Amino acid sequence: MPVDTALSPSDDGSGSVIAAVRDARLRRSAEQAAHRLAVMDDRERVSRRLHGEVIHELFAIGLNLQALASEVVDDTTRRRLDDAVSSTDQAIQALREVIFESNNLLASQRRSSSTSTPTPPA
């Protein structure tokens, strides 16, 4: 069994040393759980930014393109602007799907990590 040890001088002035020994697997398990939580937090932050900033910006671009298309007289240019609006709408939908899937995965991971706590090995 791998162990972590810590040595500390005794406070009683005798010059003796106190040794603490613990199962290193528990520490590693706790570090791994902390890392998983940090990764999940980062993914949630990215998801929030995608939804809060990127999708809103794409939506604004689409609205501006629609307004421009309504002012254009040339049919070819109007069609190209309409195509750009459609592409923007598809990009927004794709991002929403990715965010939704990511949020579902994160929720599932959070549930499983909250139910699994490190236990001392036998």
Image: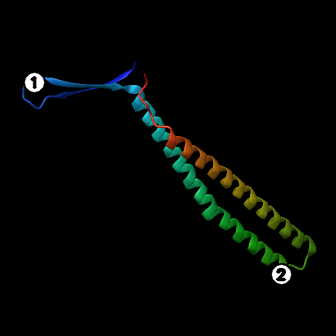
Which residue does the image show at 78% across and 72% down from the upper left? 65
The percent coordinates of residue 58 (x first, y second) are 70, 65
Q: Which residue is mark 2?
A: 71
Q: Is residue 86 left or right of residue 46?
A: right
Q: Is residue 122 left or right of residue 61?
A: left
Element under disc 1: loop
Mark 2, residues whose alpha carbon is within 10 Å: few (<14), some, or many (≥20)?
few
Looking at the image, residue 76 lies above or below residue 25: below
Looking at the image, residue 13 lies above or below residue 74: above
What amino acid is labelled 1 in the image? Gly
Pick the residue in front: 55 or 79.
55
Q: Is residue 85 left or right of residue 12?
A: right
Q: Residue furthest left?
A: 13
Which label sits in the foreground, 2 or 1? 1
Q: Quadrant of residue 48?
A: bottom right
Q: Earlier in the sequence, mark 2 or mark 1?
A: 1
Report the quarter where the N terminus lies.
top left
The percent coordinates of residue 20 (x first, y second) are 26, 26
CA gap, disc 2 and disc 1:
89 Å
Q: Is residue 106 left or right of residue 34?
A: right
Which label was assigned to residue 2? Answer: none
The percent coordinates of residue 61 (x first, y second) are 72, 69
Which residue does the image show at 33% across and 26% down from the upper left? 22
